[in-house]
């Protein structure tokens, strides 16, 4: 018997546009012999399903159901495709937990922790994962850029503490007025800002998921930005070269794979996550940058590239993710 799946997309942040692109790819690669899929847009206007005739139907939030043509439809599981809040920060996960609806992403606690970059690196650090030194700034307690100069070495990255997609991110090369401008830019996106030291090295990112009790790593990607760093334009507007699989030695690859599996286990991740690293040649080790618990799934996104490099079709991959949600 077919499972009824809610493909949840949209969101309340600026990352919604990426979520819609991800949902198109996922929807086009769902095995319709196994699943009936309904695309649900969670947006500021409401939680909406649009039927084949263009009619918009509001979700009944009491049980996450829809009523079309006098027929009530409930869902066996939710396929998470929201980047940013409320689908990547744990809010929707908590809601689905209360309704006992399985979903394809990390649970509420893991999602909330990993959505906060500072909490992520703090947990990783005490667990023996290498991370960059950083300082967390709070908007209502921040006085001046000078208060962080003595704590960190330049260059530094300045980024919103919550969220992803590199929106509001800047690289600052010296303790100058650029730092204040970068902090103001990041505060426009979030009331917490993370300032972290730059780590020289190769940027490598790797998808990780669990299947049949085993943690599996996808072929990793090396990102070579055409800009000074991997910002929003580099990530989504073609301003970078993405080499999949990355041209690295087996020794380097194994260190990254091992770190990725350890991180996936430590944070109790579920579903597909993408973990970003800088491999520092001097230290001979990968440094974790962040964990993306709902990574992009558009045709140009990194995880679909890695799935294809592994020799899987996207249909096989999304089937595996959905089936794992029921385990």
Image (cartoon, helix red, strand yellow):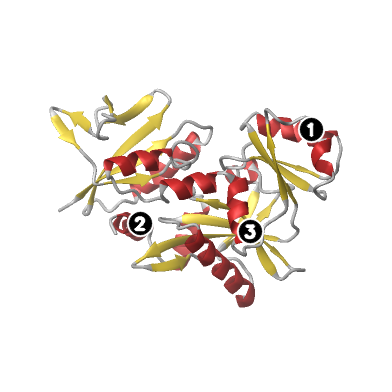
Q: Position of residue 80 (x, y in %)?
A: 38, 45
Of labels 1 and 3, earlier in sequence is: 3
Please report contact status of discs 1 and 2: CB closer than 8 Å, yes or no.
Answer: no
In three-dimensional space, the C-alpha distance between marks 2 and 3, rounded to whole angstroms, equals: 29 Å
Provide the secondary structure element on which disc 3 rests.
Answer: helix
The circle drawn on residue 321 is 2
Q: Position of residue 171 (x, y in %)?
A: 75, 43
267 in relation to 140, above or below: below
Local crowd at mark 3 within 10 Å, few (<14), some, or many (≥20)? some
Q: Position of residue 125 (x, y in %)?
A: 63, 58
Please state if 32 lies on the left or on the right of 298 as rendered.
left
The circle drawn on residue 180 is 1
Can you tell which quarter of the image residue 91 is in?
A: top left
Please report contact status of discs 2 and 3: CB closer than 8 Å, yes or no.
Answer: no
The circle drawn on residue 125 is 3
In three-dimensional space, the C-alpha distance between marks 1 and 3, rounded to whole angstroms, equals: 28 Å
């Amino acid at each position: 018997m077919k499972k009824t799946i809610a493909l949840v997309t949209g969101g309340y942040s600026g990352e919604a546009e990426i979520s819609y692109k991800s949902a198109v790819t996922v929807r086009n690669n769902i095995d319709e012999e196994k699943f009936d899929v309904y695309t649900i847009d969670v947006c500021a206007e409401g939680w909406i399903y649009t039927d084949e005739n263009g009619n918009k139907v509001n979700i009944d939030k009491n049980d996450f159901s829809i009523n079309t043509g006098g027929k009530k439809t409930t869902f066996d599981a939710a396929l998470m495709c929201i980047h940013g809040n409320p689908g990547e920060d744990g809010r929707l996960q908590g809601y689905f937990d209360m309704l006992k609806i399985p979903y394809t992403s990390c649970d509420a606690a893991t999602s909330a922790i990993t959505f906060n970059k500072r909490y992520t690196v703090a947990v990783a650090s005490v667990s023996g994962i290498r991370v960059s030194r950083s300082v967390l700034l709070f908007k209502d307690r921040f006085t001046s850029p000078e208060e962080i100069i003595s704590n960190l070495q330049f260059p530094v990255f300045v980024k919103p503490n919550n969220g992803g997609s590199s929106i509001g991110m800047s690289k600052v090369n010296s303790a100058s007025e650029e730092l204040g401008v970068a902090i103001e830019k990041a505060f426009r996106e979030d009331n917490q800002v993370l300032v972290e030291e730059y780590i020289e090295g190769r940027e490598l990112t790797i998808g990780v998921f669990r299947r049949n009790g085993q943690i599996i790593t996808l072929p990793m990607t090396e990102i070579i930005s055409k800009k000074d760093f991997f910002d929003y334009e580099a990530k989504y507007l073609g301003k970078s070269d993405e080499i999949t699989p990355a041209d690295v030695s087996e020794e380097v690859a194994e260190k990254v794979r091992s770190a990725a599996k350890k991180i996936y286990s430590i944070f109790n991740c579920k579903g597909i996550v993408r973990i970003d690293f800088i491999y520092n040649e001097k230290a001979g080790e990968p440094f974790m940058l962040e964990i993306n618990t709902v990574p992009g799934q558009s045709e140009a996104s990194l995880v679909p590239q890695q799935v294809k490099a592994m020799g899987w079709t996207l249909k096989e991959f999304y089937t595996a993710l959905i089936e794992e949600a029921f385990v």
